[in-house]
Amino acid sequence: MTSSVIIYSIVVLSLTAAILAVILFFTAKNFYVYEDPRIAIITEKLPGANCGGCGFAGCKALAEAIVKAESLNGLMCPVGGNAVATEIASVLNLAATESIPKIAVVRCNGGKVNTKSKINYEGVFDCANAALVMASTGGCPNACLGFGNCVRVCQFDAIYMDNDSRLPIVNEAKCVACGACTKVCPRKVIEIRNKGIKNRRVFVSCVNTEKGSIARQNCIAACIACGKCAKVCVFDAISINNNVAYVDFTKCKLCRKCIAECPTGAIHEVNFPPKKEKVLEEVIVANN
């Protein structure tokens, strides 16, 4: 009797397992989702930073978008750059197209150097929290708050806080223009711009939207929207909107005429060689 029960149990279990196996087989077959093998190949070629700089949730999401589009147009990994783009293009049998190198630029020059402390902030040392309760320690409602949220989110150690000014400084050699710092900044003082020819750039280091006199009271280096820079620019690269000037890097030819015109030094030049004395004398004569 006992042996019959055992045999019966084994038969029942075997039949149950067989039925379940058949069900699982047909379920897997019906619900199987095909994945293009190129997705895995492209994902492997991407750096794996998952920083979101490409606009997607991660490297695999970018790989899926690239394979689906069968193109690299508008789909670029800022960390991998042109080298990775070339490798991905070879997987898709496409001709690689180079993208313009970009970099994060801090468009605030206030900090402790060009402003006087008017507010003694005693809250949480976090930019997002501070932005809810104050303008800035110097009074500018658009200025960098100086608590380093941008530094904490950078996965590439490409940004740090200057001890003297308490403003963020971008390390050009490490910045991959992923945009993490721009997203976390509540004042939007960090912008992703073209690196420029020979890494040379001209930009307005100010986002203060107050009227000139008020802006200057809060920061001696503030843009006062006088318009002199826009008038001297022959390339129509400078506009004045909402009381602040902006240099369009897609139009700017790096002539630097605007820099000599700016009365507050709000326009910055980066990585240019020192001007020769003769050129400086010509500028002085022209301004007189």
Image (tube, rainbow, N blue to C red):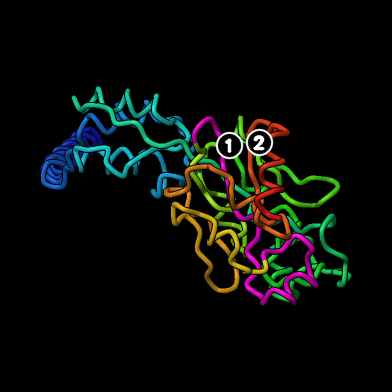
Does the magenta-highlighted stretch encompass residue 208? yes
Quarter of image, res 122 = bottom right
Secondary structure state at the residue bearing disc 1? loop
Task: Report the quarter where the C terminus lies.
Answer: bottom right
Percent coordinates x, y for residue 182 in the rendering: 56, 54
Query: Distance between the Cα atoms at labels 2 and 1?
Result: 6 Å
Does the magenta-highlighted stretch encompass residue 206? yes
Reading the image, the residue beneath label 1 is: 175
Left or right? Give the position of 50 relative to 245.
Answer: left
Percent coordinates x, y for residue 7 in the rendering: 19, 34
Secondary structure state at the residue bearing disc 2? loop
**Do we see residue 4 in this rendering?**
no
Task: Tell me the magenta residue range.
Answer: 197-223
Percent coordinates x, y for residue 70 in the rendering: 19, 37
**Do we see residue 133 in this rendering?**
yes
**Residue type at mark 1?**
Cys
Disc assigned to residue 171: 2
Q: Is residue 9 above or below residue 238?
A: above
Residue ID at (73%, 33%): 277
Left or right? Give the position of 231 relative to 87.
Answer: right
Q: How many labels sit on residues?
A: 2
Task: Report the quarter where the N terminus lies.
Answer: top left
Quarter of image, res 107 = bottom right
Query: Crowding near pointer 2: few (<14 within 10 Å), some, many (20+)?
Result: some
**Residue type at mark 2?**
Asn
Look at the numbered discs 2 and 1 and tell me whether their residues touch, using CB distance below 8 Å: yes
